Amino acid sequence: MDPSRGIGTFVVWDYVVFAGMLLISAAIGIYYAFAGDKQQTSKDFLMGGRRMSAVPVALSLTASFMSAVTVLGTPTEVYRFGAIFSLFGITYLLVVVISAEIFLPVFYKLGITSTYEYLELRFNKYVRLCGTIVYIIQTVLYTGIVIYAPALALNQVTGFDLWGAVVATGVVCTFYCTLGGLKAVVWTDVFQVGIMLAGFVSVLIQASVIQGGIGPIINDARNGGRLNFWNFNPNPLQRHTFWTIILGGTFTWTSLYGVNQSQVQRYISCKSRFQAKLSLYINLVGLWVILVCAVLCGLALYSRYHDCDPWTNNKVSAPDQLMPYLVLDILQDYPGLPGLFVACAYSGTLSTVSSSINALAAVTVEDLVKPNFRSLSERHLSWISQGMSVLFGVLCIGMAALASLMGALLQAALSIIGMIGGPLLGLFSLGILVPFANSIGALIGLLAGFAASFWVGIGAQLYPPLPERTMPLSLETYGCNNTYNGSNWMTTTAMPFSTTAFQGHNVERTPLMDNWYSLSYLYFSTLGTLVTLFVGILVSLSTGGRKQNLDRKFLLTKEDMLFNFDNFKKKEQVLGYKSHPVEEGGTDNPAFNHIEMNFTDPSGRTSGTHL
């Protein structure tokens, strides 16, 4: 590589490719707003009328899961900490199986729009309100980071206008979510998965051409100690080991897949339960493909810069900028391809943001508007849903402006999901798996889970763990022929939160900091879930949880587990939206239906609602 030749810049074609991606996304929104069957009811708008099929939903789940944080963060992660990240492939498998076999059956058979409706059916409306408010705060926060982070990284490397990009993504997203509802969200996601793969593949092909094939890339990685797959150290303080990724990662991502409204809302919008499960399993393949691409990109990044690290060498100011830097470095002779990569990163953003906006609208309408204003017609609710989409779009752009005052990317986003998602996962698990859990236990358990995970999470942000816990691998600059004297790299990589405002720099390290606050960030979620479950079970038992009379359909039953085998006997029976007649204007709540539900217990008793 000739270092005297600088990296490229953005040219007109790159902007054309990027604008094209935004325009096609907007066009899909317009199509679903006016063509075909219009969005008559809020159900159509928020749930795609429950007529979606498995493949587009699967791709959509993959897309919104893979935000720009993945596109820019994962390759950097592999570059700095090694390919152990690829063990997440096993985690994804566990997550999908848990979501499809434990959470999906219960949510699907209840026919709910918002996962938090379940909390009211199972516990009471206060638990539901708690869950809803926490979810809204979490999602707006996270979405802000997801909009801002890629814009910043791309801006600093490519000179791509920062606030122009943030506002453009926010506006386009809000536009197609508001016009097209869930159908537009799902189909734009399908298009965006294509763009993301194209972006990754173009980088991989060009990198392997320049480095002389995949072989040298793998060799460089082996020599640099980047192929560190097997680290079975059980110590929970080490950032990534086999156990933290498999155990901690499973809890962290199950809170996203199993109970997070923006994911659940989509697989519940499938035609039948079989299609819903299928969409989760197809999506698993998508996750694996994207993971492999991202890890390979990380290894290509290392192979390209193994003797001259642009970050230590002050060519880029943050690790998140390494990937755009590589793109401009190797794709500069191909106008339009750097634009494709930027479009790839932004597709990640758009798909995540759009699903968040749609889910936030659904939660607000179902959990806050409907229970309090019963008289609204479907037409009005549909308008309110659209209004909510606009409102949350604006809120998320505002949140991105706030995110510009916060620091580092991947970890902060994941920590927020972990700290908030963990206790919520515990709450739903209590409801679905523990028959004697009651509402007092649920609320106190939830609060205890939050207390525990926020204590660790905020402690870890204030006093970041030491490098021997995070174990960054060495980055070299001996191959750079410039006069910059390479200072010891430890000083540059030890502080991932360089911009956090309230950081104790030279504080005495106490045992509390070195042990409790140094917990791997993947365990925040695990801690929250387990504390919530444990406290919830104890409190429920001590407040008479065994005496309550509970309808079996709110729990995971034997029938749900055996459902997969029935499928092969009789081809899918398509479930109607609701299995009971609903009077016009009556409340639409399966808990108060007019048909008695007969589930025969093993003892032969029939439990049901007798009216």
Image (spheres, rainbow, N blue to C red):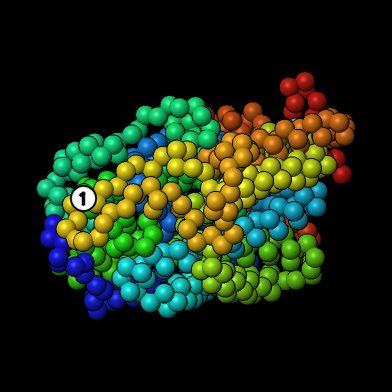
| Residue 301 in sight from this viewpoint | yes
Q: Return the x and y of residue 273 as percentages of the image width and height.
A: 55, 43
Q: Quadrant location of the C terminus? A: top right
Neighbor class of circle 1 (other Cα within 10 Å; few <14, some 14-19, many 20+) is few
Residue in the picture at 76% in, 36% down = 536
* Total numbered labels: 1
Q: What type is the residue that disc 1 sits on?
A: Tyr
In the picture shown, does residue 371 fall above or below 293? below
Looking at this view, name the residue that lies furthest to the top: 603
Pointer 1 residue: 478
Residue in the picture at 45% in, 77% down = 163
> Is residue 333 rendered to the left or right of residue 451?
left
The secondary structure type at the circle numbered 1 is loop
Q: Return the x and y of residue 416 as percentages of the image width and height.
A: 58, 52
Q: Return the x and y of residue 252 as percentages of the image width and height.
A: 55, 43
| Residue 258 in sight from this viewpoint | no
In the picture shown, does residue 417 fall above or below 585? above
Looking at the rendering, which quadrant does residue 23 occupy?
Answer: bottom left
Residue in the picture at 13% in, 57% down = 1
Toward the viewer: 323 or 39?
A: 323
